């Protein structure tokens, strides 16, 4: 309300407007009823993108000439009321001056409640968020200029919002008509954005851009189960997953100076290119084993006694199509290759089997996890309706521990595993699977002595829930 107690009038795209006071006890029920009306009488929706909820309007402060200006403090010569509500506007729990930054936060809370009551996992995105809004919604960054500096800034933005408690943040992907290479690099980097959102159709006009965007989507889909598990864990326990190197290697002082590459979870190091015409990059790799993602070739070996890591020249030529990704020794994660017959939807992907990649560290150990749920309802975490598998490995065996709800049934096909790849293994003389029912199954193996990569294939894909361990050294009789 305005200073006279009347409903505040503003001007937006729709014309003269009133605003919902989301701090009022009745506001949430009113908002939910309006969303119901919208869905029943206008059109169906699976998610909501909240725009202009800073709040933004087309006049400064009061839109009515009868209301005199009252703001004296103008930092930078610009009024605090510029294109927003008057700071003396009254909310139920205070004034606009005190609550301006919280409007988006309380709005996304009410919007999330709409979906939660219907047990629907609707997507909620918002321009305006606050610390902790990530439990309700993702944050959409303002449309950046399509420049090389803006590309680099997008990584810093995601870093920041991870620490603000908003892990699901969204830089918009936009092609540069005058710079094809910049557009290509943007799509490469977007492979690992929390959400891959294209804000224009320019990529279809240039084959060079389309080819890179297609490769980026194929790689993203190959890693989608891993990315989904990281997001799920953020919802389950909090924390971040798109991180600077020093989050993972906080005892390495040099990692604090490396902000151009970043970690996805604890498994993947991504090295983007932010410079036009670049084909080679010197990138810092902390002291650990590091492998190429696709073939498992070791590019950096752990150096016993070294205080720092290694500066490695990384090939970032666009002829590779994919962004440069390396696997950290000590990581285990799911992978679903999308090169020959790529999935076109997430539902299609869920009908495909997973592979498990094991990258051994300097002690020949590794660990990781994967999480599955039905992906539609909003009560999965509260009711523990998910399957959580924890992986641990040494130099001879992979152990699979089930930590989810054994009463929850999942029909997701991707809970079946068809192969396992072990990177950095020195010897192998068998391949044997141990099931939870006490039985053993003989598996097919292929060992590359040059790369030191062992690939184990199941004759028939098998549910993760049924596997206790897979062994590749000194197996029991019958599995040699």
Image: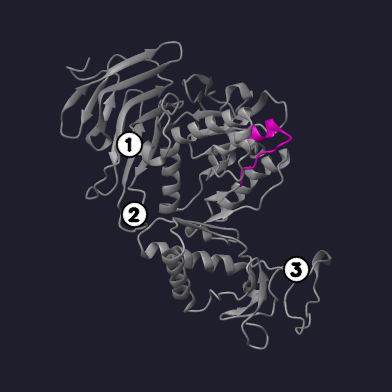
> Who's the residue at 53% across and 68% down the image?
106
**Rendered position, 410 above or below 283:** below
**Rendered position, 65 above or below 166:** below
- Disc 2 versus disc 3: nearer the observer: 3
What element does badge 1 sit on? loop
Q: How is the image coloured?
A: one colour
Query: Does any portion of residue 44 appear in the rendered image?
Result: yes
> Who's the residue at 30% across and 21% down the image?
457
Task: Name the one closer to the observer, 21 or 448.
Answer: 21
Q: Which tag, 1 or 3, sits closer to the chain's start?
A: 3
Q: Which tag, 2 or 3, sits closer to the chain's start?
A: 3
The x and y percentages for residue 146 are: 70, 42
On-image quarter of the C terminus? top left
What element does badge 2 sit on? loop
The x and y percentages for residue 19 are: 59, 74
Tell me if mark 3 has few (under 14), some (14-19) or many (20+) residues whose alpha carbon lies within 10 angstroms of its own.
some
Q: Which residue is mark 1?
A: 351
Q: Which label was assigned to residue 443?
A: none
Task: Name the one closer to the observer, 217 or 477.
Answer: 217
On-image quarter of the N terminus? bottom right
What are the residue bounds of the magenta stretch?
172-185
Q: Which residue is mark 2?
A: 380
Query: Does any portion of residue 308 appear in the rendered image?
Result: no
**Rendered position, 254 above or below 76:** above
């Amino acid at each position: 309300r305005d200073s006279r107690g009347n409903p505040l009038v503003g001007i937006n795209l729709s014309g003269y407007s009133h605003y919902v006071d989301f701090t009022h006890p009745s506001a949430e029920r009113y908002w939910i009823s309006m969303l119901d009306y919208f869905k029943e009488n206008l059109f169906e929706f699976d998610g909501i993108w909240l725009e202009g909820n800073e709040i933004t309007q087309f006049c400064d402060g009061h839109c009515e000439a009868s209301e005199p200006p009252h703001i004296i403090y103008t930092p930078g010569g610009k009024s605090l009321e510029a294109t927003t509500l008057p700071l003396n506007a009254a909310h139920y729990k205070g004034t606009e001056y005190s609550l301006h930054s919280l409007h988006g936060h309380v709005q996304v809370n009410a919007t999330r409640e709409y979906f939660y009551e219907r047990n629907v996992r609707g997507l909620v995105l918002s321009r305006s968020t606050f610390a902790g809004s990530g439990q309700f919604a993702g944050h959409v960054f303002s449309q950046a200029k399509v420049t090389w500096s803006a590309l680099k800034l997008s990584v810093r933005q995601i870093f920041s919002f991870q620490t603000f408690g908003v892990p699901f943040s969204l830089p918009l992907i936009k092609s540069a008509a005058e710079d094809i290479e910049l557009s290509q690099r943007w799509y490469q980097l977007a492979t690992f954005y929390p959400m891959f959102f294209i804000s224009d159709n320019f990529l279809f006009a240039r084959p060079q851009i389309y080819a890179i965007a297609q490769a980026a989507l194929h790689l993203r889909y190959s890693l989608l189960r891993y990315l989904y598990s990281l997001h799920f864990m953020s919802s389950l326990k909090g924390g971040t997953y798109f991180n600077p190197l020093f989050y993972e290697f906080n005892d390495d002082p040099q990692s604090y100076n490396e902000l151009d590459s970043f970690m996805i979870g604890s498994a993947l190091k991504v090295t983007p290119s932010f410079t036009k015409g670049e084909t080679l990059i010197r990138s810092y790799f902390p002291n650990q084993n590091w492998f190429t993602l696709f073939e498992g070739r070791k590019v950096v070996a752990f150096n016993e006694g070294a205080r720092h890591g290694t500066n490695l020249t990384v090939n970032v030529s666009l002829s590779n199509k994919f962004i440069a990704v390396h696997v950290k020794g000590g990581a285990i994660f799911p992978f679903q290759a999308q090169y020959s017959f790529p999935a076109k939807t997430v539902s299609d992907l869920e009908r495909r089997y997973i592979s498990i990649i094991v990258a051994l560290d300097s002690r020949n150990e590794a660990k990781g996890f994967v999480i599955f749920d039905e992906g539609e309802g909003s009560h999965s975490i509260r009711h523990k309706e998910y399957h959580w598998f924890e992986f641990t490995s040494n130099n001879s065996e992979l152990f699979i521990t089930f930590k989810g709800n054994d009463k929850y049934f999942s029909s997701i096909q991707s809970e079946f595993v068809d192969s396992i790849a072990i990177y950095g293994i020195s010897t192998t003389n068998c391949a044997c699977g141990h099931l939870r029912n006490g039985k053993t199954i003989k598996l097919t193996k292929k060992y590359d002595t040059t790369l030191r990569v062992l690939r184990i294939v199941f004759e028939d894909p098998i549910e993760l829930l049924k596997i206790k361990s897979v062994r590749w050294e000194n197996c029991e009789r019958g599995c040699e």
